[in-house]
Amino acid sequence: MKVLSTLLGGIVLLAATAGAADQGSKADQVVALLSGYEYEASKADFDAVGPEAPAVLMQVASDAGLVKIVRARALLALRFYPGEKTKAFILGVVSAQGQDEMLVRKGLHALAAGFGKKALDDLAPFLEHENPDVREAAARAVGGMACKKALKLLTGRLAVEKNAMVLTVLKE
């Protein structure tokens, strides 16, 4: 009986370890997709990871131990999975105090690409961000939406913007 109990305990432990390893291998798979120099992974690539692709992308984007460009690409890839959890995650990243500007910029692009005009109210405050690179990214994200509200936001920023790079984008 004790042998059977020990054997069953080992099987349960093995199953739990396999599940954790599978999650780890999915993260490794996603990191590999995001690590190419010239290759940009498609939605089909991430869908092949399985239904947990958005969660794995969020895990990768949150992993401070990874190279920043991989994290930024994971954030941008979330555009393929528009939903409330995704939007909340991206907004949390881009709104975090002291967040790296690359992650903020890629997050703004992900919001625009994944949520379109529904993200305008979320993007608008970034037109006034202290960092001109972030303002440029916000202007490009808002500028990609052909609607009156986007035009009004960009026109309003044009009247007060001082940075030459951002002004160029606003005028495009």
Image: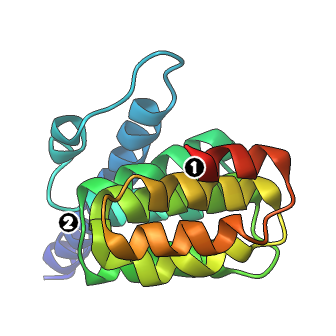
Q: Which residue is mark 1?
A: 72
Q: Residue at x 36, y 38 (%)?
A: 29
Along the line of sight, which residue is nearer the eye, 149 or 30? Answer: 149
Please name the amino acid that badge 1 sits on.
Answer: Ala
Kind of element beneath mark 2: helix
Residue 94 at x, y = what percent? Answer: 61, 72
Q: Residue at x 54, y 18 (%)?
A: 37
* Residue 160 visible, this orientation: yes
Which label sits in the foreground, 2 or 1?
A: 1
State how far apart marks 2 and 1 are (Cα).
39 Å
Q: Residues within 10 Å of mark 1 (few under 14, many from 20)?
A: many
Kind of element beneath mark 1: helix
Q: Which mark is residue 34?
A: none
Q: Which residue is mark 2?
A: 11
| Quarter-of-image position of residue 129 | bottom right
Residue 23 at x, y = what percent? Answer: 33, 57
Q: Residue at x 40, y 57 (%)?
A: 57
Q: Quadrant of the C terminus?
A: top right
Residue 80 at x, y = what percent? Answer: 25, 54
Along the line of sight, which residue is nearer the eye, 28 or 120? Answer: 120
Q: Is residue 90 above or below residue 36?
A: below
